[in-house]
Amino acid sequence: MATAAQWIEGARPRTLPMAVAPVIIGSAAAYDLGAFSPLRAVLAALVAVLLQIGVNYANDYSDGIRGTDDNRVGPLRLTGSRLATPKQVKYAAFGCFGAAMVAGLALVVLSSTWFLILVGIGCVAAAWGYTGGKNPYGYMGLGDVFVFVFFGLVATLGTTYTQALEINAAAVLGAVGTGLIAVALLMANNVRDIPTDRVAGKRTLAVRLGDGPARISYVMMLAVALLLPLFIVGSYPWLLLVLLLVPACILPAGLMLTGKTGRSLVPVLKHTGLINLGFSVLYAAGLVITRILA
């Protein structure tokens, strides 16, 4: 039986900044629109975090029963390591999805954004379908699209809209930026797993691109994310704070471009998650400070 600590490790807490980052940006955009709501921001964060943990457990379950994780390098996998039964991990995923839906329903009721119920159902279906079901799209190289759409655009713009009932250019660019960094994190993870994924028939985008182009795409996504705020820096001059992250990108970019493999890429995952969190905090600070000083 897996211990509590192993269940926590299996939830992959290092991926949680990817869930929190869009909520921080979306809430700052709502503040810029004069409509920040702490309660709705907390509910949005709960939805995002619970969905992320649910996705992680769902991936653990689905990859485990397919044998994809039999020789996995990286974080603990509960199913693949036989520390928990597939049924236990599946129920843990469903429990997280259910809790996310409860928090999401509360958010919808408070904001009267009833159409977002359909978006929420789509989020849960996409989360399960990533590696679950008969034709998981994560095995077809579409996982990166899912991450960009749901952990970038939907999470950020949904957070803004449930508070302000509108979105602005700052919310959109922030959503694209954090979405790109989240995809970069997934790309780094999948570059590490290229050898085992090829054997298992998991055709991730990294596998389809090949090792070299996939590594270059990682660096390009970080670069574009950091440069995007320059498009609106005339209206939000404090968004230049985001450029403070450039030095933090040097180490993970260097590890990717120098061809590091296996466990040598684990620091890239950690640093990319922190870069996403740093991006969200600095981007949000830029919006808030600009509005305060306006």
Image: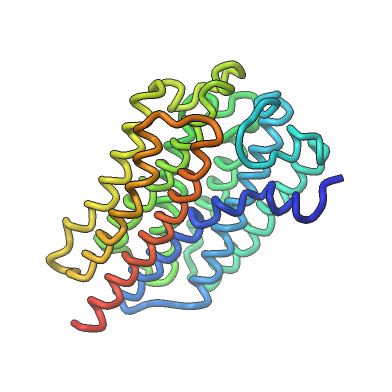
User: Would you say 272 lies left or right of 80 here?
Assistant: left
Choose top left, top right, bottom left or bottom right for residue 67.
top right
* Residue extending furthest toward the right: 1
Residue at (30%, 76%) from the top-left corner? 288
> Number of labelled discs?
0
Counting from the top left corner in percent of width and height, residue 278 is at 39, 61
User: Would you say 133 lies left or right of 171 here?
Assistant: right
User: Would you say 230 lies left or right of 164 here?
Assistant: left
Residue at (55%, 55%) from the top-left corner? 16
Counting from the top left corner in percent of width and height, residue 62 is at 68, 32
Counting from the top left corner in percent of width and height, residue 86 is at 79, 36
The color scheme shown is rainbow
Quarter the C terminus occupies:
bottom left
- Residue 259 vs residue 40, the one in the foreground: 259
- Residue 224 vs residue 30, the one in the foreground: 224
Residue at (43%, 49%) from the top-left corner? 272
* Residue extending furthest toward the left: 234
Residue at (23%, 58%) from the top-left corner? 229
Quarter the N terminus occupies:
top right
Choose top left, top right, bottom left or bottom right for residue 281.
bottom left
Counting from the top left corner in percent of width and height, residue 144 is at 44, 36
Residue 160 vertical placement versus 152 (above, below)? below
- Residue 167 vs residue 220, the one in the foreground: 220
Residue 68 vertical placement versus 163 (above, below)? above
Choose top left, top right, bottom left or bottom right for residue 74.
top right
